Amino acid sequence: MNENRRTFIKYMALTGGCAFVSISPTKLFGEEGEKRITSSESVNDTSLNYQQTRQIVNKAYVREIQAHLAYAKFPQKALKEGYPNIAYLFKSFAVAESIHGRNFRNTLLSLGDPPGRPVEKFEILSTRKNLDQAIQLELNEINIYYPEHIRAIKEEAHWNAITAVAHALGSEKQHENLLQKMKKGTGIFWGMLKKRIEGEDVTFFICQVCGSTLNKIPDICPICEKPNSFYKEIERHI
């Protein structure tokens, strides 16, 4: 087992396997580790087949693209029902999920595997029900899928896969938090949502590296720790 894999497994043991959001080469391996990772010399052990990692990354890719397809369609329904801010939120999430999908796709291609072919999974319902679908989707990612993925791939310690999973997990936590805030306090009084949410001036910014989704630009990305120059404002036009 090489030193990077030992270091990573020790880190995973200390964090309980999934208790992290921000993950970077510097955080795991120090400045020298980051230099090695970002240079042409990869920390990935080329002697390994990464069979488990390939399977997990492909599953994650398919799910992220399925989520992207759903979030790309939810906005039109929200606009028709008079919820432009919710439509904008869904559009922003669609962009973030596409970034996650891109990262997983690139990891698969680096391993020599073609990505799977996603099929549309989510039905377009009312905006209220679409919000419920979105919350459940994010909760499943946070509480079930990504923790399971991290446990499954930690032994093979493929850096690109670990980074892609960790970045997606951190972003999904942001999505779930935004969705819960949007629904908080409305209860069965769905009519309150329009007054409380649609009257706000909301702008979303997304990190083009990891998909971090925030309503203001941070000094550095809280997930991938890249400079804020990687954040892009999402246009409202749908």
Image: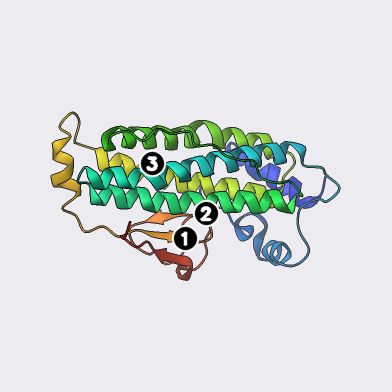
Q: Position of residue 158 (x, y in %)?
A: 72, 47
Say if residue 213 shows up in the picture: yes
Q: Is residue 207 left or right of residue 202?
A: right
Mark 1–mark 3 CB contact (< 8 Å): no
The alpha-carbon separation of the residues under discs 2 and 3 comes to 17 Å
Residue under label 3? 176
Mark 1 residue element:
strand
Earlier-in-chain disc, 2 versus 3: 2
Mark 2–mark 1 CB contact (< 8 Å): yes
> In front here: 53 or 132?
132
Residue under label 2? 99
Three-letter residue code for mark 3: Glu
Three-letter residue code for mark 1: Cys
The alpha-carbon separation of the residues under discs 1 and 3 comes to 17 Å
Residue under label 1? 207
Quadrant of the image containing the N terminus: top right
The alpha-carbon separation of the residues under discs 2 and 1 comes to 9 Å
Three-letter residue code for mark 2: Ile
Q: Position of residue 76 (x, y in %)?
A: 31, 47
Residue at point 32% right, 42% down?
179
